[in-house]
Structures are given as C-alpha cells and as structure tokens.
Amino acid sequence: MDRRVAIKNLALVLGGATLFPKNMLAGDTNLIQLKNLSITPAQEKLLAEVAETIIPKTTTPGAKDMGLHLFVLLMLDDCYGKHDQQQFAEGLKQFAAIAAKKNAKPFALWPQAQREALLLSIEQKNDLPAELNRFYRITKDKTVQGYTQSKYFMTKKVVYELVPSRYNVNVPVKTKNTAVKHG
C-alpha cells in the first residue's frame, strides 16, 4: 500500500471516530429513537434475543440479522396506544425478571432449547400476568410480520409475480386426428 493512501485512510478513520459519541461506541444507547416508548439498551438487547428465539438464524438470516426487534419497537411506538405501550414495557420487565429467576446466565447465553421452552411456557399459560402475555403476543406477532414483509423474504422465499400467470407464446399444442361426422 502506498504511504499516502495509508495516511489518508488513517485520517479518515480518526476523523470518523471523533464524530461518533463515546456512548454510541460503547453500546449503551438504543439503536432506535422512540417518541412514546422508553426502553433501555439492555431491554432492547433482550428483545433482540427474544425475537432471535422466535426466528433463529439457520441457513437463512435470523431476527437479529434483520433487525426485527427494531421493527417491533417502531410498530409499537407508532401504531399502538399508550395502554398497550405501558403493558409491553411492564411485560418486558416481567420477562427479564422471570429469565433471571430461571437461570443465572443472561438470556442471550441460554441454549436455544431452553430459550424456546421459556417462550412456549409463556405462550401456553393463561394464568400469567396480562402485561407479560401482551408483551409476548406483540413481540411474536410483529417479529413474524416483520420477517414476512422483509426484503429478504419477499425476494428470496416468495417469488412474487405481478401478474398471476405468464403469457407463453410458444406452447406445443397436441392435435387429435379425429374425423368429424357430418350427417
């Protein structure tokens, strides 16, 4: 590499680093700014892990790769009422408390099977607090909605055609040699 190019690249990197706030580099800010909802960076990361449990990364991108937790938060912030937003925030706190009670490790470090078991237990039990159920329902619904409406899903998984069928000009036609009787 040329010395001038190296110095130029170093100047660009250092200049770019000064433009970022320190807390953004440290990871203690939210990735999305919300108007009506107050979520901490730790809660945002927990929500990302819950979404990743719902749609895990396999040969296809997972929920975290697609930023679906941000979609959940944005939809909640823009499209839901104050009551639902409060229930979601309270349910998220309750989920964090349940996860901390079940395992000393953070939810992100749990094995996939254990994470799925916790979410299934929340889905199947009706005697849990309403806030926790509301949190789970909104998270699951919006995660799936975000995935099925994503560019990846619409271009790679579902091949969308504007017209329901194609117009094929050159189609072989079978003819039958049947004599028509006129009588």
Image (cartoon, rainbow, N blue to C red):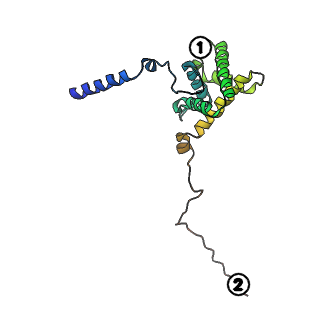
User: Of all residues shown, which one is farthest toward the left?
Assistant: 3
Q: Is residue 59 above or below residue 87?
A: below
Q: Is residue 1 visible?
A: no
Rate crowding at label 1 as few (under 14), some (14 to 19) or many (20 or more) other CA atoms within 10 Å: few
Q: Is residue 83 visible?
A: yes
Rate crowding at label 2 as few (under 14), some (14 to 19) or many (20 or more) other CA atoms within 10 Å: few
Task: Name the N-terminal-most of marks 1 and 2.
Answer: 1
Quadrant location of the N terminus?
Answer: top left
Residue at point 40%, 22% (across, down): 20
Residue 168, image x, y percentages: 54, 63
Q: Is residue 101 above or below residue 163?
A: above
Q: Which quadrant would residue 93 be assigned to in this image?
A: top right
* Residue under numbered circle 1: 105
The span from disc 1 to disc 2 (Cα, nearest Å) is: 86 Å
Residue 123, image x, y percentages: 72, 27
Identify the disc placed on residue 181. 2
Residue type marked 1: Lys
Quadrant location of the C terminus?
Answer: bottom right
Q: Which quadrant would residue 105 be assigned to in this image?
A: top right
Element type at marker 1?
Answer: loop
Identify the disc placed on residue 3. none
User: Of all residues shown, which one is farthest toward the bottom?
Assistant: 183
Residue type marked 2: Lys
Give the side of residue 154 with respect to residue 84, left or right: left
The residue nearer to you, when weighing 61 against 180, is 61
Element type at marker 2?
Answer: loop
